[in-house]
Image (cartoon, rainbow, N blue to C red):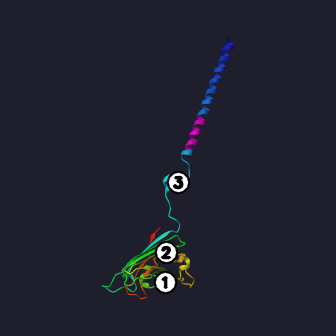
Amino acid sequence: MKRTLGYLLSLALVGTAGAQTSSGSGSQTGSGSQADQGSKAAPQGRPAPEARGRSKPKSGEHKFHSRLKSSNDVNASAAGSAAPSGTADFTTDGAVIVYEVHVSDMATPPAAAEIHMGAPGDAGPVIVVLPLTPNATGAAEGKGTIDASQIRGTKPDGSPMAMDDLVIAMRSGKAHVAVRSKRNDPAGLSGPIESEGP
């Protein structure tokens, strides 16, 4: 009888110890699982969803605008005469420049616009010629693309200007657009090329 009771007590003690061990290891496993889930829920080093959704402007893309007025031109028209006006817009990715020019109310329809170096009153050298299509009312417009082969200006050291040189001049306000029907036309118009950003 004593042996039987002793044996039963031993079984009971072994069972209790086993349950405690199992319970301890189970809680450790559970906490480990929660830690794993936590690390998956909040990964390190990744941007927030709203940051990932923001788009960046294309590298090198830039927009420019020029408001063309007769009062800007080196050959400004006299007071009381017709006042031609126009706009020129440019977009570049660094490799080419896409342009669009519109002019109106010129005494004689012009055949081309020109990008010059310097401010409008400086009458700097012609860098690029932009062909225009005129109509009978004194208006004209032109659209197209400027590539490196159309740039005919030179740098101070005498070497040919590249596309980068032209874009830098436009970015820094050192270029302007001029439109006239013929050289020294008193009814010409021009305007500085101004950066509008990406």
Asked whether, in this view, residue 109 is left or right of residue 93, the answer is: left
Mark positioned earlier in the residue sequence (2 or 1): 1
Q: Main secondary structure of the magenta part?
A: helix
Q: Rounded to the nearest whole Å, what is the CA distance between mark 2 and mark 3?
A: 41 Å
Residue 88 appears left or right of 30: left
74 relative position to 6: left or right:
left
Residue count near mark 3 (Cα–Cα under 10 Å), binned few <14, some 14–19, many ≥20: few
Q: Mark 2 to mark 1: distance in Å?
A: 18 Å
| SS type, badge 3 | loop
Q: Is residue 99 visible?
A: yes
Query: Helix or strand or loop: what does disc 1 sit on?
Result: strand
Disc 3 or 1, which lies upstream in sequence?
A: 3
Taking 5 as reference, is 36 above or below it?
below
Residue 8 image point, x, y percent: 65, 17
Place of residue 14 in the rendered image (x, y in percent of width and height, measured from the top left): 65, 23
Tell me: residue 45, above or below residue 133: above
| Residue 126 tag number | 1
Left or right of 178 in this view: 43: right
Magenta highlight on residue 11? no
The stretch of residues the image draws in magenta is 27-39
- Which residue is pictured at 46% across the width and 69% down the height? 197
Query: Could you tell me if the residues under marks 3 and 1 are in contact, i.e. CB atoms within 8 Å?
Result: no
Q: Most extreme residue toward the bottom, as rendered?
A: 184
Q: Residue at x 51, y 77 (%)?
A: 166
The residue that disc 3 covers is 47
- Residue 168 position (above or below residue 49): below
| Amino acid type of the residue tagged 1 in the rendering | Val
* Residue underneath mark 2: 144
Q: What residue type is disc 3 on?
A: Pro
